[in-house]
Image (cartoon, grey):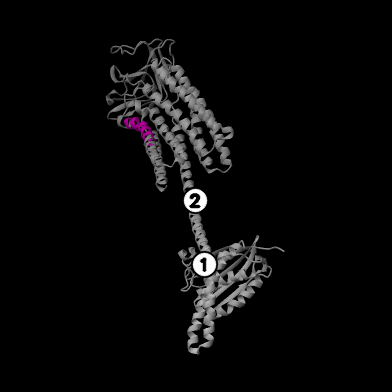
Amino acid sequence: MKGVLKGIIIVMVLLGLGFALYSTGLLNNNKLDAYNVTKWNVGWVKDLNMPAQNEEIKTINGWHPADIDNPMPGEPDNTAQAWIRFQLPPLGEGTQAVLLDKVYARSIVIYIGNTKIYQSSTKKDYPTKKIIAPFQVKDQNKTIYIGLTPQNSRSGLMKDAIKVGDYEQLEKYYVKRDILDFILGGTLLLIALVMLICLLFLNYEFLTSWIALSVVILSSGLLVITYSTFLYTFYEVNIRGTQWIFDGALFALLFSISVFFEKTIGKGYYSIIPITRRIYAVYGLICFCMIIFNVANNYEYDNLYRTLTTTVTGYIMIVQSVIMVTTALVEALKGKMEAIVFSTGFILLAFTSLIELIIYFAENQKYVLVLWKFGLICFVISLIVILGRKFVKNHEQLVEYSGRLELFNNELQQSEKMEIISELAASVAHEVRNPLQVTRGFIQLMAEKHQSQDKVYLSMALEELDRASGIITDFLTFAKPEAGKATVLNVLNEFIHIEGILVPMANLQGGRISMNIPPLLQVRGNSSKFKQAFINIIKNSIEALHGHGEIHIWAYEKGNYVYIHVKDDGEGMTPSELARLGEPYFSNKSKGTGLGLMVTYSIIEVMSGVLTFKSEKGVGTEAVIRLPSVKE
């Protein structure tokens, strides 16, 4: 269990590092020192063939002024290609470059004057282009031409300003911004792989939740990687080859979140969470079939496919966000900590996702989603925390159950021992007592007839026989610990008699007894058995004094019970000795049998009471007896 908790901590550290790297990269990107071109001219043409030197590009309807807010004005009705032109600003020394951060185009070609400096690969069929094209400082103040081939309805749309500046700085920006997405996604995939391997060592109880969380992290990593332009900018990866991975990961994420929510938080009102989970499963299967159908028909149904996997899925995600956040908040208001953690993480994810979905649809699906990655990481961390709390709770329950099981086993062993001694006492004690009494009678007769020198030995024999008879009496008392005739006993009066019996013994041992018992405490039981039980307890305390000390006895009523405390400042006991009190034949005294305390436990039990001991070696021992009180 500790290894699993350590693994969870490592997962959170890896996520934190990935998140920190990503955030650091964004902060560094904002510090880019480059010239931003925010205005240019657009000319629409039939092809992108560059005219001969000193010849003007022939446009369809002339050149149109454009800027970031209106990047591609004057587009003719028929599909056409376009040129963007602007004059390069004065620049510093060294190699310079032009950077197009987000451009929707099938292909791009860049000229400075009549010199081609860049042409995109036709193999990279990715709608969002990110281009860096180096040039020499001698080309500054010249006119640059950027040719764009339309990409569906987003022909040549440029979201950001065109950046011109030092090549090394722009190259770092060009690489770092997207590679951090790749690192973050790879980290999530590695974590998911490790978690899936851990399934081999996991208890069945956590299997479903663990698999669901693994799929959430795995699908999150796939979403981050396949959505990043790094994959398509630096590798010749076709967008059609990864689109189905992105869509499949998205539906796996929706489904696994529902499963995890159901297992850790609850099913919600009217079992709405299982219902949504089934809807995601069916809808995901429909979309998967649509993927196969579209590929088999050479992507002729792209529009229908995008409608299903983009527009409809977006609305489904909005509905899911509302349902889960509402359900989690209801559970959180009930004080369920897992729901509070889930609500916090999911609200962050839902808030960022909803904002970006609104912007995405408002801008005709031209917006590039960014913020959802932050919300997704926060949400994944919250899920890990929830599962970690579940492991901790299970560990605490396991410790509690182990303690209960140990206590039950100890009680069972004690009960078995008591049963054995009881049977032994019942079957043997009477048979042993009869010959002992006969023997004692003859020895007593012999002692009366013999001289004084022989009487010493006979008296010793009589004392040992009396001790053996007392042991047998204890056996019989334990075997049949009936309370006898039960009456209402005044605790103070009973202890006055006990004090009269034991004070001389305490004085001989060099100790003293003090009592503080109210006069109106009453319990039900047999007077002789009551005295016998407390005489055994107090005698043990006297013998533990070893020549000096004090025994303090006090009592009080609390609720429906009378509590009686007997405390001494004698030698005390170790925890192991304390745990064995009441066992047959266990005693700290040289000639003790342990039967006296066994009898005491039996008498207290018959009176529906409880006897407990507290002790510390070298400090003393305290016996606490709880008996039902009797109200007049």
Which amino acid does the dot numbered 1 rest on? Answer: Val
Compared with residue 417, is residue 452 higher up or lower down, i.e. above or below? below
Compared with residue 528, is residue 149 higher up or lower down, i.e. above or below? above
Q: Is residue 177 magenta?
A: yes
- One can see residue 562 in this view: yes
Q: Residue drawn 28% across and 19% down?
A: 116
Q: Quadrant of residue 384?
A: top left
Q: Residue drawn 42% across and 20% down?
A: 291
Which amino acid does the dot numbered 2 rest on? Answer: Tyr
Q: Measured from the top left, where is residue 322 in percent x and y?
A: 55, 31
| Upstream in sequence: badge 1 or badge 2 | 2
* Residue labelled with disc 1: 428
Q: Quadrant of residue 106?
A: top left
Mark 1 vs mark 2: in front = 1
Quick check: 391 left or right of 625?
left
Q: Measured from the top left, where is residue 207 in percent x and y?
A: 44, 38
Chief secondary structure of the magenta span? helix
